[in-house]
Image (tube, rainbow, N blue to C red):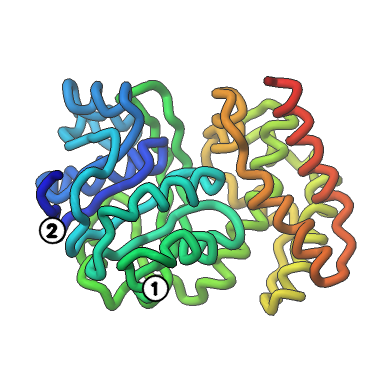
């Protein structure tokens, strides 16, 4: 059994976002940062460092491991695994969680915190030590040991700012700040994602292609259904195609398209699928989001 890692930040998920966050933290406080990722990614990082194109000129020295195998006393666990892998990843942490562990969830989609709390239910982790945040950052996993960052920011639920870990996230090369309204920020991110992510797969294109106005005829009904469901959930927030097009500031590839090309399951059920599910709950028709969800599942089935 490994020794307890106290007052450290452990990033669970060595994909593009997790790797960028880990590198940024390691540049500031190397001895406190550990990235948990796939074997080949961890091996190259430990041998040569992590290349973060667009953020750092030199490779970043970083402690990378394949799994958590040490007690998480007084540690912050930043979870960046995909929503589809979240429950399994969190349940695997059960032997290492402590009452002093704090967890920060940075997934796309709806129902993330509820899933996490259910996964943690029989562990020593305190429910009020589980927090959620929103990542608005373009990043791409290029190859093991190499990611690309297009910049962005992270917003966190206000309660996290009261924890001792919040100060550790200051001074990074991208803004990390408390959200003024976490519900609105979560829904804004979701409404953008239900357009950009599935359309990137259907078009097999970069974000700039998806943001072209010629595709607004499909974006608008997707968003209209999403906004109607958001209102039923108590968040009256209007997002239209023009907003989404302006939101796209870099020509990166969405995480859903990256997953699709690597043969991995998409997060469609946490995005458009979640809109369709909530539509059924509230009696709101969501045929377009339901159809988009079915299309992505069909493409995944054809791919395999």
Is residue 301 rendered to the left or right of residue 104?
A: right
* Residue in view at x 53 percent, y 66 percent: 114
Residue at 26% over, 73% down: 163
Indicate left or right for 139 with 146 as reference. right
Residue 77 drawn at (x, y percent) = 30, 55
Q: Is residue 226 left or right of residue 38?
A: right
* Quadrant showing the C terminus: top right
Label number found at residue 127: 1
Query: In which quadrant will I find the N terminus?
Result: top left
The answer to which quarter of the image holds residue 46 is top left
Nearer the observer, 59 or 123: 123
Q: Percent from the top left, x then y, of residue 86?
A: 48, 49
Does 146 appear above or below 289?
A: above
Asked which secondary structure carries label 2, the reply is loop
Q: Position of residue 185 (x, y in %)?
A: 55, 66
Q: Please, is residue 226 above or below residue 302 in the view?
A: below
At 26% from the left and 44% from the top, the residue drawn is: 68
């Amino acid at each position: 059994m490994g020794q307890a890692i106290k007052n450290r930040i452990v990033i669970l998920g060595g994909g593009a976002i997790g790797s960028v966050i880990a590198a940024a933290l390691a540049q500031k406080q190397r001895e406190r940062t550990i990235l948990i990722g796939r074997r080949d990614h961890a091996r190259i990082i430990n041998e040569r460092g992590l290349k973060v194109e667009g953020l750092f000129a030199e490779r970043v020295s970083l402690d990378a491991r394949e799994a958590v195998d040490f007690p998480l006393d007084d540690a912050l666990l930043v979870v960046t695994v995909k929503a589809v892998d979240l429950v399994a990843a969190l349940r695997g942490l059960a032997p290492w969680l402590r009452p002093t562990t704090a967890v920060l969830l940075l997934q796309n989609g709806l129902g993330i915190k509820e899933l996490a709390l259910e996964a943690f239910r029989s562990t020593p982790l305190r429910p009020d030590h589980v927090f959620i945040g929103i990542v608005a950052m373009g990043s791409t996993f290029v190859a093991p040991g190499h990611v690309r960052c297009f910049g962005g920011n992270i917003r966190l639920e206000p309660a996290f700012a009261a924890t001792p870990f919040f100060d550790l996230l200051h001074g990074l090369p991208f803004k990390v700040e408390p959200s003024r309204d976490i519900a609105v920020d979560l829904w804004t991110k979701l409404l953008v994602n239900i357009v950009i992510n599935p359309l990137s797969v259907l078009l097999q294109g970069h974000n700039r292609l998806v943001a072209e106005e010629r595709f607004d005829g499909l974006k608008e009904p997707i968003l209209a259904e999403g906004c109607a469901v958001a209102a039923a959930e108590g968040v009256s927030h209007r997002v239209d195609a023009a907003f989404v097009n302006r939101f796209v500031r870099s020509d990166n590839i969405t995480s859903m398209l990256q997953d699709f090309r690597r043969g991995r399951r998409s997060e469609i059920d946490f995005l458009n699928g979640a809109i369709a599910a909530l539509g059924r709950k509230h009696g709101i028709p969501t045929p377009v989001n339901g159809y988009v969800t079915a299309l992505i599942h069909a493409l995944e089935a054809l791919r395999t």
